[in-house]
Amino acid sequence: MLKAHPSDVSTVNRGDSPRWRTAKISLWLALVCATPFGGCSLPRRNFEPPVEPNSLNDAQFLHYLATVPLVSVDEGARAVLMLVGDSTRWPAFEDRLAELDRRGGIRPAWKLEPEDMLDMGTLAMMLRSVVTMPGGVNNALSSATGIGERRYALKSCMDAGVLPYSRPRGPVRGGELVAALAKVEALESK
């Protein structure tokens, strides 16, 4: 039986050539380096508020929230804590985070910044910390382990009719937050 010599083969496997290997490595490095800078991040807000939100009283702040295209973490924390009491009890962002952390609504490991966009999963965690909502086994397990806790918090808020169906990393719009606050107040009054 005749065997073909490797140099006689007319088709060349391009995956083994040094040039192709260099191209694959370059593409892999570009993807790895670019992912932290925007691959999975929330959109940035280009909205400049007409007034400083912290200078508004609670009623004015709710009217302001309805006009905001995307809600920041600071605005969301203030809005959620308004369900508990007067927001003047927590005048600074650090005070709001400390109160939400005390209630179990956020985790310090998340490293939230005031200007970051609020996502639906984080909002759901905040809401569940100030209001009692029914939860299942998945909620208990995720709260204990920290794995998937925002996702299951969002699921329980969606099941209760507080938040619309969305993905946990989806941004929160101002109207959605105001509607969620109204629904939570309606649930609490029952």
Image: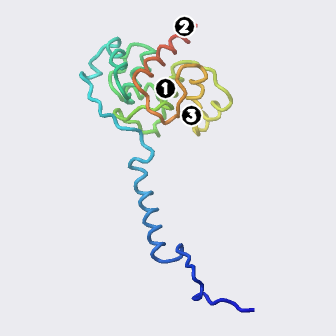
Please, what secondary structure does the residue beneath circle 1 have? Answer: helix
x then y, percent, for residue 3:
69, 90
Crowdedness of circle 2 by 10 Å Cα count: few (<14), some, many (20+)?
A: few
| The one of 114 and 50 positioned closer to us in this rendering | 50
How far apart are the alpha carbons under marks 1 and 3? 13 Å
| The one of 166 and 17 positioned closer to us in this rendering | 17
Residue extending farthest to the left is 50
Q: Residue at 35% of width from left, 28% of height from top?
A: 93
Crowdedness of circle 1 by 10 Å Cα count: few (<14), some, many (20+)?
A: many
What residue is shown with label 2? Answer: 189
Would you identify the image quadrant in which residue 99 lies?
top left
Q: Tell me the quadrant of the picture where the C terminus can be found.
A: top right
Please, what secondary structure does the residue beneath circle 3 have? Answer: helix
Q: Please, is residue 168 above or below residue 24 in the view?
A: above
Nearest-to-viewer mark from 1 and 3:
3
Q: Which mark is residue 151?
A: 3
Q: Residue at 50% of width from left, 77% of height from top?
A: 17
x then y, percent, for residue 173:
41, 26
Q: Which mark is residue 126?
A: 1
Would you identify the image quadrant in which residue 81 lies?
top left
Q: Amino acid at mark 3?
A: Arg
